[in-house]
Image (tube, rainbow, N blue to C red):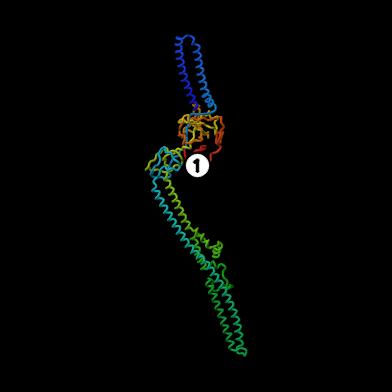
Amino acid sequence: MPGAVTEKAGADRGVSDQTEARSASEGVAVEHESKSSEPPASGPRFTRRRKLLIGVIGALVLIVVCVFGIPWIREMLTTVSTDDAYVNGYVTFVAPRIGGQISRVLVDDNYRLHKGDLLAQIDKEPFEIAVSQKKAAVDTANADLQAAIASVRAIEAEARSRRWKLQSAVEGLENQIALLHDRVAALDKSKAALALAQADFDRAKQLLGTPAESRQVYDRYQEAFSTASAQVTQALAAIRQVRASLGLPIEPARDEDLGQVPPDLDQTFSSVLQAQADLIESAAQLGVVHSFDQSPKQMLAEFEKAGDIDRVFAKITAEAPAVKQAEAKLDVAKQELAEAELNLRYCDIVAEIDGVVTRRNVNPGNYVQVGQNLMAIRSLNDIWVDANFKETELRDLRIGLPVDLYVDMYGGRRVFKGRISGFTMGTGSTLALLPAQNATGNFIKVVQRLPVRIDLEGYDPDKNPLFIGTSVVPYVYVNQPPSGPDAGKFLQTHAPDAQTGGSPGNSMGGNAPGASK
């Protein structure tokens, strides 16, 4: 821009010089005619006036050269510029997340909007029906869960009953064993009484008929002996009855005591085995697996070791397979409901960034697919300048150098401020779709251009907006110290922190996730 101003000033000076020369020539002709009519005494005075006019004109030219030429020369020596630069920025393509028929479109091209504004709507009726169905499915799954819990609680009550039945069976077995020992002791007592009665009866029998023993005494001892013998028979019958109830042989084997029982009788006793099997069946329905090799006393010991029996069964009930299955079905139904509600919310297509609508290509009634491009949003804040400097001009350029930006659409009335934020790792020719092949033998050296990114500083789109693609003439001040991150370097030392929006170095706005240039 300073060069253009200088050229305009030079053109103005040329026109002024021609006008003054024409005026001077006309003046000379008039003076020549006047000289012919006037006396020769006026010649020296005309010469002085002519010299004065020439001096004034020369002074004016010198002042113009000093005012415009010196700053221009100084600027040319302290800046690097190019006219191959333009405004660039992010663009976010709007696409639906669900498929459906567009019911209305609320924006058009060149509409300015804010993040979250409604752009278009997909017909919600099918998705509202889907939400209602999923809510019914959740209610059904919840009812199934309650039914499963009730069923498990019934099984829990049955298991509690069978647990006490097992304990009662074990206690009954122990009582039977104790009764057997008691009956054996009673048999021993009866045998001792029988032995005493028999001895008294034998002695009375020997003394019968003598004055020392009367018939009455003999009968009494005979009766006592018979009674003792009956008591032994009765005690023996009681023992046999108890042994039979315990599942033992009525007559023990040789050299075995009548009160002797096997040590594993609790594992072979029929009532205990039946109670144990019933408890194992109920526990299996609750998801608790017991081994048949486990003795009944060991099973009962596990319940006692676990602590409060109510807490044990409550824990077992919560982890029962039927309850777990019903809970899983309820979770699936809730997830499907959440997905249906999410799809219903996706019917509202909203703006993800602040910007201006461009490339709208959707109308009410169109059926759209997931990911179909509906329109684009150009950001007003996330813009920068891409300047393609010649490779011969890159020697003094570094990250952080200040830049003055002259935009053609504003002329010289507005100068934007910026700073260099990075260099593209490759020239335009190498990044092209079909890069040049210089190994064919007909190489011609061409000065390459490298894209340099310039971020705007203090940019306010409401006051002086910049449009994508407009031409810019940047002036980089290479004699001023660089500032900001990675100042004075060619390459950035690290990637910027993850951002929810905004281009690095632009303090006015944010990058939209998924935006592209």
Horizontal and vertical percent position of residue 34: 45, 11
Q: Which residue is most to the right? A: 212
Residue 439 appears anywhere in the view:
no
Horizontal and vertical percent position of residue 316: 51, 60
Name the residue: 57% across, 70% down.
261
Count the marks: 1
- Looking at the image, which is closer to me, 41 or 99? 41
Q: Is residue 189 above or below residue 512?
A: below
Q: Which residue is mark 1?
A: 500
Residue 482 appears anywhere in the view:
yes
Horizontal and vertical percent position of residue 315: 52, 59
- Looking at the image, which is closer to me, 393 or 37? 37
Name the residue: 45% across, 9% down.
37
Name the residue: 45% across, 52% down.
334
As shown in the figure, which amino acid type bears the numbered disc 1?
Answer: Thr
Q: Secondary structure at mark 1?
A: loop
Crowding near pointer 1: few (<14 within 10 Å), some, many (20+)? Answer: few
Horizontal and vertical percent position of residue 144: 44, 57
Q: Which residue is most to the bottom? A: 211
